[in-house]
Amino acid sequence: MEMSTQQCLTSLISTHPDYTCLNEMFPRLIELSDLPVADPVAAKFPFLGSAWLVTFLLISYLLIILKLGKKFMEHRKPYNINNILIVYNVFQMIYNVIMFCMIVYYCIIKPTYDFTCMETLSFDHPRKNMERALSYAFFVNKIIDLLDTIFFVLRKSYKQITVLHVYHHVLMVFLPYWVVRFYGVGAQFVTTAFLNTFVHAVMYLYYMITAMYPGMKGSLWWKKYITVLQIIQFLIGMIQSAYILNFNPECDFPKIFHAIIIIGGAIFVAMFSNFYIRAYIMPQRRKLK
């Protein structure tokens, strides 16, 4: 029986991982990689031009964080990479703030899209290259995000390498590639980037503070609200898609992508909600007993 991507990732991260599910992915990728590219210009950007490069990157990532990395660290003490983490978190925070500000400028201050029907800009649109640049910058940032897990491995923080964490990181690289390949850049996924960059700017601010001042890790009251923001971002994306499907059905943004946004968003809402309950609500209840 064929596994879904989520089932495959769950299997890989389990106590007894089943790597055979990776073999099932290759025939599908071969078929998909033969389809024409929606935006030939964007396809020339590094990583966006080859399904195999993205696949190799993600398989390497999975092997490192789930097997090779743990094997490498088996007889080693956790590395003290605090200074690296400070630089990394500062970089990520600034990167996301810049992207967020640019999206605000091009979507709100100087509106480029109609939020009731966000379609990819035509090739001759004066802001098309900016749309490509922002989309690619977001995609590259999702690749950089993979370092989060590598750092967990080097610090032996294996409990943080959860199904939610791995699923989220893999999907945020895998999905944008195929969206650009089949549909093009920008469009309604700009909403995703708008929300995600804001959430990540806040998240990496938290990580930066705790890396610089480890003693504050347990005292920052707003930590749990980062998870709340993550849940809200998916809810907003789902609401936007549901609104367009119901009140603007003539919108040319593919309905399959609306379905992906709604279904994928629902999965993430459920997973992040489960994390929030386990991390914040249940411990509080245990304290009250």
Image (tube, rainbow, N blue to C red):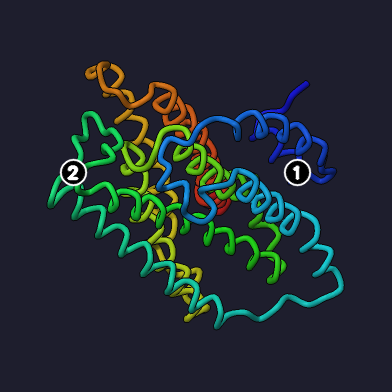
Q: Position of residue 116 (x, y in %)?
A: 21, 29
Q: Is residue 255 above or below residue 233?
A: above
Quarter of the N terminus within the rendering: top right
Which residue carries the number 2 mark? 112
Q: Position of residue 58 (x, y in %)?
A: 65, 50
Q: Residues within 10 Å of mark 2 (few under 14, many from 20)?
A: some
Residue 12 in the figure: left or right of residue 151: right
Number of callouts: 2
Q: Residue at x 48, y 27 (%)?
A: 263
Give x and y (percent) for residue 174: 56, 43
Residue under the image location 48 percent in, 43 percent down: 176
Disc 1 residue crowd, few under 14, some 14–19, many 20+, Cα 10 Å: many
Identify the residue at horizontal 56%, vertical 79% (top origin): 84
Of tags 2 and 1, the one toward the viewer is 2
> Which of the marked residues, 2 or 1, is nearer the chain's N terminus?
1
Secondary structure of residue under mark 1? helix
* Along the viewing direction, whichever of 256 and 85 lies nearer the viewer: 256
- The residue type indicated by label 1 comes to Leu
Q: CA distance from mark 2 to mark 1?
A: 41 Å
Looking at the rendering, which quadrant does residue 185 occupy?
top left
Amino acid type assigned to the residue bearing label 2 in the image: Thr
Q: Is residue 207 left or right of residue 22?
A: left
Q: Is residue 266 above or below residue 200?
A: above
Q: Which structural element holds mark 2?
A: loop
Q: Which mark is residue 12?
A: 1
Residue sitting at 51 percent across and 48 percent down? 48
- Coordinates of residue 99 in the picture (x, y in percent): 32, 59
